[in-house]
Amino acid sequence: MSAQIESEKAPTGPVPSEEEWEKTWLGTDDKPLAHADRPVTENLIKFVDRLTNGKSGSTIFLPLCGMSNDIKWLVDQGHRVIGLDIVEKSFRLFFEKYQMSFTVNDLPNIPNGKVFENEEKTIKLFKCNMFDFDVSLMEKVDGIWDCGALIVISTPDRPKYGQMLLSVLKPGGRILNQSYQFIWDDESKAAEMEAGSVYEDYPCPDVEEKDYHLLYGARCNIEYIGEKDVTNEPDWADMGVVSAKENIHLMTLK
């Protein structure tokens, strides 16, 4: 792991355990919850050429990827995918769904760390806590598809998260980010989100424009691509949201 990341002394927010993540994102049954097995993300399909700079055969990193169908879609487009998530079950469900043969090996010096890889070596998925991960175990990547990962990183951990992503990019590499902003029917709910409403004592604030510049502005050119009203989508319907806005940004390493 880079010295810069190792020397990061910012306080760390509480991080949900593997069991907490699994219950929240996959549920307790063998069949995963709908949001864990959602269709390929529209913004990835729409903006993949911006992410890859129009290049074929790119290597793309997906932080907090779960069992995302985006993984298979990217591979089908001729790219290679590296993913990272704490929930082992999500990887097994992914390979089972697509009937892929895979290997599993332990990660050295990482608590409960494992690496899953398909037979064709086009998919490599690291199972561990993100902040235990040693980035030297993966090669540099051409792009990062951050699909809602930043919004579930606690405020104290966001600088460390941003540093990690930048550290694995090749020169000129790109981060395509999909995040959200909310307006609540009750202001106290916004405060609860800041304090920890999704997980017990786990802060999960939305992502504002200034956050991209704080995390990436020193080393990246930042482009605001667009937004979409997602207020009526099932993810937010029962959360007491007056409006939910999906934002897309592209960060390119200088």
Image (cartoon, helix red, strand yellow):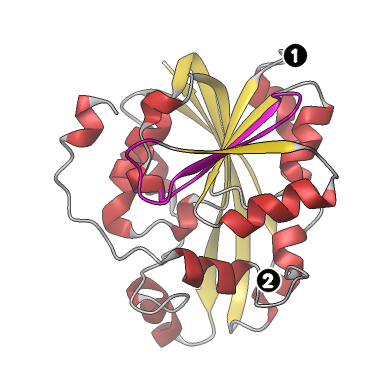
Q: Identity of the amino acid at label 2?
A: Asp
The residue under label 1 is: 56
Mark 1 packing: few (<14 Cα in 10 Å), some, or many (20+)?
A: few
Asked whether 184 or 139 is in front, the reply is 139
**Mark 2, secondary structure of its residue:** helix
Tell whether 40 sits left or right of 124.
right
How far across and down, in percent of the image, does residue 106 sit?
47, 40
Q: CA distance from mark 1 to mark 2?
A: 33 Å
Q: Which mark is residue 42?
A: none
| 111 drawn magenta | yes
* Whether residue 108 is situated above or below residue 80 in the rendered picture: below
Disc 1 secondary structure class = loop
Which residue sits at x=71%, y=25%? 122
Q: Position of residue 82 (x, y in %)?
A: 59, 32
Say if residue 109 shows up in the picture. Answer: yes
Residue 107 lies in what quarter of the image?
A: top left
The structure residue drawn at horizontal position 47% and vertical position 64%, both measured from the top left corner, is 18
Q: Is residue 224 visible?
A: no
The part of the chain drawn in magenta is 108-129
> Which-is-in-front pick, marks 1 and 2?
1
Residue 127 drawn at (x, y percent): 51, 46
